[in-house]
């Protein structure tokens, strides 16, 4: 029950109790006492007194009650409107709309001071998030140069024919970690730019089925050492509007995860389907499923958060930094699509993506299946 409804119910209860008390007092004053007085004087009682009282109640008290309840409801609705607006603003507040400010009445009442406090809190949060983003961008930028130097130095050392096996393995491990740090820095830079609204995407017609076939070929190479079976079950000719390189990155990240978080001898299934004729849904459906340990259902709402790695027991020894799915989600949402994750632990995990189709292109421009 909302606060407004509770307050209105309390107001109605108080109003009805007040009317009941007033009615009782009027009955005592207009009926009981006059009848006692007439009886004391030996006069016959008046039969129409009660009728007159009921008529007065009917024509005066009932309309007054209805008017009081209706007027009270409207007054409370107007008085509590700032609270409703504040509650909606608080529930909608996130890192992407911290610049939202509620209008103030400047009348100095409690609601105006509450609104002022909310606006000040939002301003402080916006300033804090801005400082964090600036720090992350600057730190990422500053880290790129030393990482490039380290990578170049290690690669140069590996070209030395005098490097023995143990030393070479040591340098290869360093090079692997440098590459991993580089991916983390690049991922942090991209996510920070997206949150700050600084990342931009191209919007050109993209043959999504062609990108899926290319990613499928790459996934077969990635899965070879693990003995995984990668199957492209459906790949309808589909054109979407978007950034080709980002969509390719999305597919590669998805398939890389499907291969890494899998069991030896498991499988990966890829499906790209267009809507059926006559359907109102004008979106392409992309589903990538993989066997493996999967995710606990309670972890699914957080699976697209940065640095979320799921169950640590499942991720032990698996390379990655936890930014892949966060980047995938940004790419999908930036293209006007939706993405959901479903998992049956130990059986199959499925990522489902829907992307809007390009409708203005003719059928001749599509790539034949």
Image: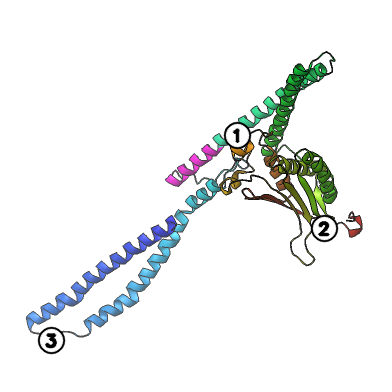
As for residue 302 lying within the magenta part, the answer is: no
Of the two numbered discs 2 and 1 on the same chain, state the one appearing first in sequence: 1
- Tell me the residue that label 2 is attached to: 359
Read off the magenta span: 108-122
- Tell me the residue that label 1 is attached to: 129
Image location of residue 176, percent across then percent down: 74, 26
Horizontally, residue 88 falls left or right of residue 199, namely: left
Of the two numbered discs 2 and 3 on the same chain, state the one appearing first in sequence: 3
Q: Is residue 171 visible?
A: yes
What secondary structure is found at the residue carrying circle 2? loop
Give the Cα distance between marks 2 and 1.
39 Å
Q: Nearer the viewer, mark 1 or mark 3?
A: 1
Horizontally, residue 67 falls left or right of residue 338, namely: left
The residue drawn where x is 59% and y is 40% is: 311
The residue drawn where x is 82% and y is 17% is: 156
Q: Nearer the viewer, residue 79 or 135?
A: 135
Q: Please name the predominant secondary structure of the magenta segment in the image.
A: helix
């Amino acid at each position: 029950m909302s606060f407004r409804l509770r307050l209105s119910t309390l107001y109605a209860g108080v109003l009805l109790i007040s009317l009941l008390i007033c009615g009782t007092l009027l009955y005592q004053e207009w009926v009981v006492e006059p009848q006692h007085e007439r009886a004391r004087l030996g006069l016959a009682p008046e039969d129409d007194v009660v009728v007159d009282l009921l008529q007065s109640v009917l024509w005066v008290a009932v309309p007054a009650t209805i008017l009081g309840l209706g007027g009270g409801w409207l007054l409370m609705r107007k008085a509590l409107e700032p609270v409703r607006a504040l509650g909606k603003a608080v529930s909608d507040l996130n890192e992407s709309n911290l610049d939202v400010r509620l209008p103030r009445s400047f009348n100095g009442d409690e609601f105006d001071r509450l609104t002022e406090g909310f606006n000040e809190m939002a301003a402080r949060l916006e300033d804090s998030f801005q400082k964090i983003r600036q720090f992350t961008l600057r730190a990422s930028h500053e880290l790129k140069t030393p990482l490039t130097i380290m990578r170049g130095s290690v690669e140069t050392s590996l070209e030395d024919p005098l490097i023995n096996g143990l030393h070479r393995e040591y340098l290869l491990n360093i090079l692997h970690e440098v590459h991993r740090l580089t991916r983390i820095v690049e991922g942090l830079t991209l996510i920070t730019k997206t949150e700050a609204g600084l990342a931009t995407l191209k919007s050109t017609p993209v043959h999504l089925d062609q990108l899926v076939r290319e990613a499928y070929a790459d996934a077969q190479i990635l899965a070879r050492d693990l003995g995984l079976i990668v199957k492209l079950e459906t790949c309808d000719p589909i054109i979407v509007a978007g950034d080709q390189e980002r969509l390719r990155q999305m597919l590669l990240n998805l398939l890389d995860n499907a291969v890494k978080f899998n069991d030896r001898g498991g499988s990966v299934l890829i499906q790209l389907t267009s809507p059926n004729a006559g359907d109102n849904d004008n979106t392409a459906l992309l589903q990538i499923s993989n066997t493996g340990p999967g995710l606990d259902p309670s972890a699914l709402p957080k699976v697209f958060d940065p640095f979320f790695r799921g169950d640590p027991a499942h991720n032990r020894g698996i390379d990655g930094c936890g930014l892949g799915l966060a980047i995938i989600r940004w790419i999908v949402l930036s293209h006007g699509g939706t993405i959901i994750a479903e998992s049956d632990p130990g059986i199959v995990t499925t990522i489902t993506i829907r992307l809007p189709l390009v409708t203005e292109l003719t059928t001749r421009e599509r790539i034949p299946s």
